[in-house]
Amino acid sequence: MGKTAAFAVLLLLAGGLLVAGSGNSNESELPEGAITFGLFIDTGVADALVADHLYVKGGIELVVTDGFVLDMPVTVIFDRSGSDIQNSITLLDIGLLLKYYPGNLGFWTGLSLFQGVNLIASNQPEQGYHYMTEIAFGYTFSLPNGLYIEPSIIFRDPLKTFHDSLDYIQDYVPGYGDFRVCLNFGWLFWTIS
């Protein structure tokens, strides 16, 4: 893990510990036994200004019980490094991330339960579909009306189980790194009791 990734993890952990007593997570305001639906989008598309790829991520969030949230993120990376549109590759990453809020505070840790990565191109690579795993750490800052801001960091293939797949994917789509810093904006808008 590089120095930047280690620094980002330390920053998130320190920030989470500093505000851990605030108890401002979304789950504490929900009625018992309720399921809440929401949407989120990652503002990471801003890196397209300086990178050779366009990284778009969003998804659905389900608050299923006190302290546990299921995220269903969809990530699409459009590689813009080549001048030939015919040979450009698009990456589609669909997953299911289980987030746990220890003590029902804003700090959380997450683990992917399922994640599939598909490489899409007119000249399809020989190995077009791959499995992946991720762990993530973050903090959820609740805002009024079900809105929230969530800085987080994602580590791909932390146990090196799918390292060959990750190397293969990165050969075609260099923007799919070993880690990613995210800033999600979300809205929890519908609760079923």
Image (cartoon, rainbow, N blue to C red):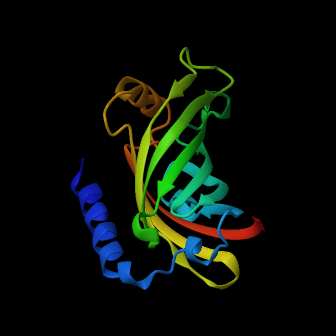
Left or right relative to 42: residue 4: left
x then y, percent, for residue 172:
49, 30
**Left/right of residue 172 with respect to residue 93 in the rendered view:** left
Camera-side residue: 28 or 151? 28
Q: Is residue 79 visible?
A: no
Give residue 84's quadrant in the image. Answer: top right
Q: Is residue 128 left or right of residue 39?
A: left
Q: Nearer the viewer, residue 86 or 169?
A: 169
Residue at point 69%, 69% (across, down): 188
Q: Is residue 183 visible?
A: yes
Q: Residue 125 location in percent, x, y?
A: 57, 19
Image quarter of the C terminus: bottom right
Residue at the image point whose x is 57% and y is 23% from the top: 129
Q: Residue at x 34, y 68 (%)?
A: 12
Residue 14, percent from left and from top: 28, 73
Q: Residue at x 44, y 37 (%)?
A: 133
Number of callouts? 0
Is 113 drawn above or below residue 59 in the view shown?
above
Which residue sits furthest left? 3
Place of residue 126 in the rendered image (x, y in percent of width and height, measured from the top left): 55, 14
Of all residues, the one furthest to the top in this rendering is 126
Residue 30 to residue 129: above or below? below
